[in-house]
Amino acid sequence: MPGKNNRMIFVWVIVAIAATGLLVSLFWGDSTPSEFSDNGPRLAFNGVLLVALLSSLAMARPKMGEVGRAVLLWGGLGLVLVAGYAYKSELTAVGNRTLAVLMPGYAVTDTAGKGSVTLYRQDATHFTVIVQINGRTIPMLVDTGASGIVLTQRDARAVGIDTANLVYSVPISTANGPGRAARATIRSVEVGSIRKTDFRAFVMPAGKLSASLLGMDFLNRLSRWEVRGDRMILYP
């Protein structure tokens, strides 16, 4: 029994080391040396086969049937890992799109180095986005018809604006009709990886606006933006 337990420990140590090495080699990213990265799939597949053979030899006397089953099992796992490596960009895109559907307002940041951020339409007319204003998170609607950033009173308080001392004296037009808003200052606005600073904003009285609006004042700070079907792409 002690000998068998020792063999089991040996096997699991080999498996753990091999699994760690495979994950590092497959998902190291751009920091992986190019030669090693190019050979990553082949190394991964050979690595799992080596794990299979060593595991079989450590567990018991070599038996062709057991070795064959181990090779098939670990070889299948190797193929899955290699396929994941080959299609990691597509899988990342699918994962981000799924998050955007499950989490309304989730901003998908481009991972290919362009720095763009993609928003997905949540209904027939609006793009909802999770925004960090002054480092605090609130949901907003992207409104190309709004000239600036317009906050509900609740959201203004949430981002640190002192709403008790605001003066609602600025005439403003919204989808709900004309009204009066108060001026406020915002230090920073962040959408995904895009961050802009120093904004003038407007705060509406309580009950006068159903959702805060991210208007053209922010969009005009971008190098460009575009709408493609159900996607809005923002470029820093």
Image (cartoon, rainbow, N blue to C red):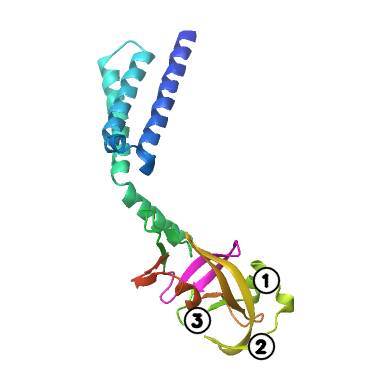
Query: In the image, which disc is placed on residue 105?
Result: none
Q: Could you tell whether 1 is left or right of 88 in the image?
A: right
State which region is magenta. Answer: 121-141
**Count of labels in the image:** 3
Residue 215 image offset from top left, x and y in percent: 50, 77
Mark 3 or mark 2, which has the lower sequence index?
Answer: 3
The residue to which callout 1 is attached is 161
Residue type, numbered disc 1: Ile
Asked whether the residues under the numbered discs 3 and 1 touch, taking CB atoms below 8 Å apart as contact, a structural biologist would say no
In this view, the residue in front, 171 or 177, is 171
Residue 190 image offset from top left, x and y in percent: 52, 64
Look at the numbered disc 2 and give the secondary structure of its residue.
loop
- The residue carrying pointer 2 sits among few (fewer than 14), some (14 to 19) or many (20 or more) residues within 10 Å by Cα, namely few
Look at the numbered disc 1 and give the secondary structure of its residue.
loop
The residue to which callout 3 is attached is 146
Mark 2 or mark 1, which has the lower sequence index?
Answer: 1
Residue 130 image offset from top left, x and y in percent: 52, 64
* Location of residue 38 (image quadrant): top left
